[in-house]
DNA sequence: TAGCGAGTCAATCGACTGACTTAATACAAG
DNA sequence: CTTGTATTAAGTCAGTCGATTGACTCGCTA
């Protein structure tokens, strides 16, 4: 698509390969986000990516799972980097808001860096919908030290909560981030949303909501 | 699958038709919930429903969209009935918790009435993932007077909130209900969850969380 | 500069798709 | 009991799927 292309002013073969790989990845991400994973064939991806070779997915990524894993990895690395910086800022705060920020803001900032339209958030939703790929995606995320440390700090802020409720609300927070970002991304892509710093605003709103949800009083249930 | 079958102790033709229709609907709901909409063909549905006729979906429901609409309608009616009762209880309360209850509990109680395993919640998630069917589903829901009155009552409890934030959090509440119920349904279906009154517990947890989220303070943003 | 190998391409395979047509079946009305 | 019709079964059709194949291009290295 752009960038590098070797140091000698010439298009070397490795550059062409890299371009092909990235063209396939970004095209696949877009098509998957728009139509869902199982609605898009490898053929469609290759053709939309300008590849005459309908087997390009098999060749460059071993297969469908490899392609999806590669896309997840690319974004995962970026988000992990950003989260590392926020984590350093948070230090050892005991304000839950700081930790929720470490959860939410890296995602929003990464999405902001992608420009408009982006597809990553909606792609993520589609991946989460597939039972097998969901596991892959969660694994990919939990490998990151910065995420594990964020969850650790967050847990420290809600220690007095019953463990079952805590797990329940953690799931809710994850779903809230995933789907709210996807909807916002969709709104931005079709121009139905304010222009600038919109992702920062979304991160703020999401943080407000999640902090409120996590700190909500737990109504006791007589019968478990 | 059971029940009725006419009053005269004999299996009449109309009963067979009804059985066929319901077999197709419940089979489709299950397959869609498990594998996603676009991963399941009409053929697979008919064969799994014990229909030799691979065109049964076209015959009984005009087509795929008609089938999905019929499934949505069936559950929508049930939920609407239950919500009507809760609405009568709530009266004109100005406690936000009552109104969130009117939103959450009908869904949970309907799911509880379906037994284990059920597929409705996960089917709903899949429908929400398809851009076209999502619109159909939302239309179907908003036709119900009981839902509109619930949202009205809810809005009355958060009138001092900026309208943008209110809409944002309403979306979040919708996503929370949809996906939390789907995950709970999945957990119940594979036996990884407590046994009895589990849906009542889920409704309580969901109500706590949503009330907390809706009433969370709004951090002012200098730049909109 | 010759040739090796990575990358690309067109063609092909059996399997599957939805839409459609035709034949058999079984019930309801007459 | 017969006739008509609603329902089901079975088969046909062109189109698309993923995977595989062998031939081709082209850059790198010896």
Image: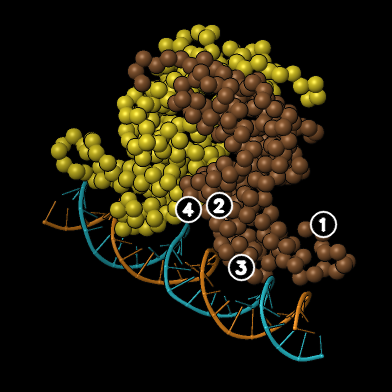
Chain colours: A brown, B yellow, C cyan, D orange
Q: Which residue is mark 2?
A: A37
Q: Which mark is residue A59?
A: 3
Residue at (37% x, 36% y) in the render: B192
Look at the numbered disc 4 and give the secondary structure of its residue: loop
User: Label 1: chain?
Assistant: A
Viewer-proximal residue among B20 and B162:
B162
Please name the residue that numbered disc 4 is placed on.
B39
Marks 4/1 same chain: no
Does any portion of residue B216 appear in the rendered image? yes
* Disc 1: which residue: A3
Mark 2 and mark 4 on one chain: no
Residue A16 is tagged as: none
Q: CA distance from mark 2 to mark 4?
A: 9 Å
Both labels 4 and 3 in a single chain: no
Q: First in sequence: mark 1 or mark 2?
A: 1
User: Which type of secondary structure does the marked residue at label 1 adopt?
Assistant: loop
């Amino acid at each position: 698509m752009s960038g590098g292309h070797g140091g000698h002013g010439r298009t070397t073969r490795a550059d062409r390969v890299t371009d092909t790989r990235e063209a396939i990845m970004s095209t696949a991400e877009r098509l998957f986000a728009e139509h869902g994973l199982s609605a898009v064939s490898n053929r469609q991806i290759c053709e939309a990516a300008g590849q005459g070779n309908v087997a390009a997915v098999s060749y460059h990524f071993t297969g469908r799972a490899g392609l999806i894993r590669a896309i997840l990895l690319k974004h995962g690395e970026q988000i992990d980097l950003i989260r590392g910086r926020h984590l350093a800022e948070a230090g050892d705060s005991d304000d839950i808001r700081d930790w929720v920020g470490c959860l939410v803001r890296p995602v929003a900032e990464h999405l902001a860096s992608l420009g408009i339209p982006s597809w990553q958030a909606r792609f993520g939703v589609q991946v989460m919908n597939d039972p097998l790929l969901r596991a892959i995606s969660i694994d990919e995320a939990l490998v990151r030290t910065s995420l594990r440390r964020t969850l650790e700090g967050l847990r420290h802020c809600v220690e007095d909560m019953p463990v079952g409720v805590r797990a329940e609300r953690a799931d809710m927070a994850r779903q809230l981030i995933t789907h709210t970002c996807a909807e916002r991304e969709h709104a931005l892509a079709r121009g139905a949303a304010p222009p600038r710093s919109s992702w920062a605003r979304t991160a703020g709103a999401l943080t407000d909501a999640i902090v409120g949800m996590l700190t909500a009083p737990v109504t006791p249930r007589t019968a478990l």
